[in-house]
Image (cartoon, grey):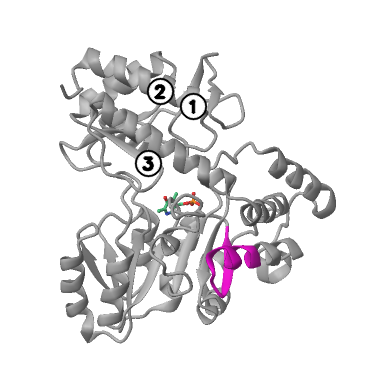
Amino acid sequence: MYDNFQKFLSQELDGIREAGLYKNERIIVTPQGAEIRVNSGKEVLNFCANNYLGLSNNPKLIAAAKEALDTHGYGLSSVRFICGTQDLHKKLEASIAEFFGTEDTILYAAAFDANGGVFEPLLGEEDAIISDALNHASIIDGVRLSKAQRYRYANADMADLEEQLKKAQAQRFRLIVTDGVFSMDGNVAPMDKIYELAQKYDAMVMIDECHSAGVVGETGRGVTELYNLRGKIEIITGTLGKAFGGAIGGFTTGKKEIIELLRQRSRPYLFSNSIPPVVAAAGIKMFDMMAETNELQDQLHENTAYFVQKMLDAGFDIKPTRSAICAVMLYDAKLSQEMAAKLLDEGIYVIGFYYPVVPKEQARIRVQISAAHKREHLDKCIAAFTKVGKELGVLKA
Ligand SMILES: *Cc1c(COP(=O)(O)O)cnc(C)c1O
């Protein structure tokens, strides 16, 4: 039986390789950070992690995690509602609600699960989900699992959203769903206008804050802070796997009845293990730190502004960004790969993205800035980009 299937799989894999879409994983042998070493022994500056606040290797979080190992053990070996909830999990949920100004929070093993488990329990056939075309894969999958009617609008296109909302008036309840920050361009969803349209057409709003939480807004409270919508959004999903320490874990936070029903009916919550105590304890510590000081957000915002300005000055074509994602536009797929390879030779680790990850003729290198980057790291990155950019003829005169 396997012989035929094996042949089929080999052909599929060859096809992926021939299309140049095969994903190779680089192996890091140090903790995640601004400076990393890969298994070849090469030391590089990392500009492609979601480690926005530089917390992946933070000593205070490590200490909190170590302490929790002693006080709460290693694993829970149970889903939440059987025997998998500790005081730590409840405390972390309260910390997240406090951070976002919401009523209650439910934890998941990952944001992928939070998004996968949010639609099906809440909305039925008689309801509508109106989703941005560039929303994360986990939202797309989550929407597919629900029986609600689906509407899609072009990325951040408010005329199109209004069009779809008009069509969705036939349904009982309407939920507009958007990423807070879109990961390929770094643009922020126009939440002021989305909220206005939601009011006008009697819709609820859900924001996925995975790339925006910790990053966007003066104090990193995400797009609801940026647009003064704190406490007004029905559903927010997010991850502990990016700015917030980068380990693992996701959450849905929002109106208390919504969270309560998710605890009863959300399948990835009911049928999957609890996050480990070390992650919960470090998460609590992380939100305590956020409440005490704005240092890391300030540093991140300063670093991002500095980097973007210097890259523009150097003559690069940068997508307008309001996040820590900086898309260096090259348009040509092959060029994006060549440039990323040459940058790696210069000790700068970045990734070139091209179709189908981004639209055709929209190839780019995505740079992700971190509060962990020192000025000398940023300068080295800008110098390397400028050198390689000149070699490849991509700088504007
Ligand atoms: C990263 C990401 C996720 C998935 O987060 P995990 O916790 O790693 O599963 C979901 N949505 C968006 C927008 C993301 O960027």
The x and y percentages for residue 289 are 66, 51
Q: CA distance from mark 3 to mark 1?
A: 17 Å
* Residue 271 visible in the displayed image: no
The count of marks equals 3
User: Which residue lies at the image location 50% right of the left edge and 54% below the top edge?
Assistant: 220
Q: Which residue is mark 2?
A: 381
- Residue type marked 3: Ile
Residue extent of the magenta highlight: 93-108
Identify the secondary structure beneath mark 1.
helix
Q: Position of residue 212 (x, y in %)?
A: 43, 53
Q: Is residue 19 magenta?
A: no
The residue tagged 3 is 325
Residue found 33% across the figure and 21% down from its top: 385
Evaluate whether residue 320 shows in this view.
yes
Label of residue 57 in the image: none
Indicate left or right for 248 with 324 as reference.
right
Q: Upstream in the sequence, badge 3 or badge 2?
A: 3
